[in-house]
Image (cartoon, rainbow, N blue to C red):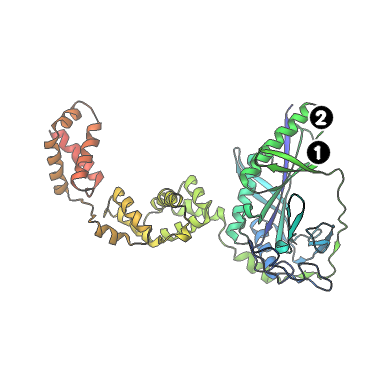
Amino acid sequence: MKYDVVIGIEIHCELKTKHKMFSAGPAAFGQRANTCVNEIDLGHPGTLPSVNKQAVRYAIMASTALNMSIDRLVRFDRKNYYYTDLPKGFQITQQFHPIGSNGYLDIETEDGIKRIRIERLHMEEDTAKQFHLDTQTLIDFNRSGTSLVEIVSLPDMSSGKEAAAYVSKLREILFYLGVSDVKMEEGSMRCDINISLKPEGSEKYGTKVEIKNLNSISNVQKAVDFEIERQSKIYDENGRVAQETRRFDEATQTTVSMRMKEASVDYKYFPEPNIFPILLDSEWVKKIQENLPELPDQRRTRYMNEYGLGSYDANVLISNKELSDFYEEVCKVAKDGKIAANWCISELSGALAKRSETLSSMKLSADHLGALINMILDKEISGKQAKEVFEDVLEGKDPKEVAAAKGMKQVSDTSAILALINQVLDENPQSIADFKNGKSRAVGFLVGQVMKKSKGQANPAMTNQLLTEELKKR
């Protein structure tokens, strides 16, 4: 039987604030356990929360970038449940009045652009982190109270590829906004997927299964694809899909049951009594919205229009913001954006991978790379020589000084190149005969001999042209 797949995604994203959502406690990853906490985070009696203004600013930025309506009246609610990672016994969230609502995100699919509707974006605080050992459970409260936004999509996705594309696009936007570091492997962006299957064309939804805490985009696609296969098999065998929460097991590449969800939990929500409603100043909100940083789609379009890049090269650059920002700096010097893109995508990325380094850790200057590209364009050095110079440029050296020290200077003087060509032809009569007999490889061999005699300084294009002309005369 064929099935329609229905997928909705909830994403929890930690905001890059210095302090926590409702306290002055430091928000930092990787610190010694239970050192980034204060009385409010631990829920001590008599403590009162105060709203982090920067978190509200970031929530407005994210909501605007996701085409959402902003609720200027900020209100919080209590979500009551008793669990060891929640010291207060409740979580402060925005259940009834999210700051952002009714947005959307466009993703690229095999069938073209698809719009994914986003129901809401709301602010809340994070929980503590538990570590389950064989005989005990340890709790680190450093994460407790960290500023979060939860972004909830409508069930508009229908495949693992679409789910992965949505998470990837959303992650890219949040990173370019600078509101989060979106490091899924560190837990600062966590993804929960709700998935159900129904007979093709049916109006009635199937049983919903939740997959919790996916920590990479590739795992999003793998988990969804496996779950589609698992549920399809159950329905094909006239079985019943259980309403449950599952997790993705990377070792087996399967989803594994965590707990059943036969009934909805009553969290007994009610308005947070210790935070009065806050009416945001309309001019403040407007100023935030009008001063968003350039978003990925805007930058992608600009690269294609301004620098003449194809969609592939533009997407490669956009997918790595550090590389994209560096490319921007190179283009301030380089005369050709396309060639600059080629160098950043191939030579530079290759060097980074080979050295296991990042741009921030390297001595390479964007100005120097731009100058090196101009030296090629101005025919001061050949492309082959440029690659040799590039090794020193990676160490922070000026390309002109490197080329001069190595005695590199591309020869474009016709008479000088002709003299070398005739010398090579006189030394290789067999290659002339091969050329006359239609063996085109002879030209490549002879060009190589000329380049060798010129110590790589002869202009390759000019050498090829002049050599062909001379061969025809012989």
Residue at image coords 47%, 50%: 304
From the viewer's perspective, tell me whether residue 430 is left or right of residue 369. left
Secondary structure of the residue carrying numbered label 2: loop
Residue at image coords 25%, 59%: 405
Amino acid type, mark 2: Gly
- Residue 400, image quadrant: bottom left
Of 208 and 219, the residue lying toward us: 219
Considering only vertical position in the picture, is 246 above or below 128? above
Secondary structure of the residue carrying numbered label 1: loop
Label 1 neighbour load within 10 Å: few <14, some 14-19, many 20+: some
| Labels 1 and 2: the sequence-earlier one | 1
The number of numbered discs placed on residues in the rendered structure image is 2
Residue at image coords 45%, 54%: 306
The numbered disc on residue 350 is: none
Percent coordinates x, y for residue 371 in the rendering: 34, 59
Amino acid type, mark 1: Thr
Residue 446 shows in the view? yes
- Residue 369, image quadrant: bottom left
The quarter of the rendered structure image containing the C terminus is: top left
Q: Mark 1 sits on what residue? A: 207
Of 27 and 171, the residue lying toward us: 27
Of 66 and 26, the residue lying toward us: 26
Percent coordinates x, y for residue 386 in the rendering: 31, 52
Which of label 1 and label 2 is nearer to you?
2
From the viewer's perspective, tell me whether residue 266 is left or right of residue 132. right
Residue 373 shows in the view? no
Q: Mark 2 sits on what residue? A: 239
Percent coordinates x, y for residue 53 in the rendering: 69, 70
Considering only vertical position in the picture, is 382 above or below 253? below
From the viewer's perspective, tell me whether residue 392 is left or right of residue 85. left
Of 465 and 88, the residue lying toward us: 88
Considering only vertical position in the picture, is 58 above or below 218? below
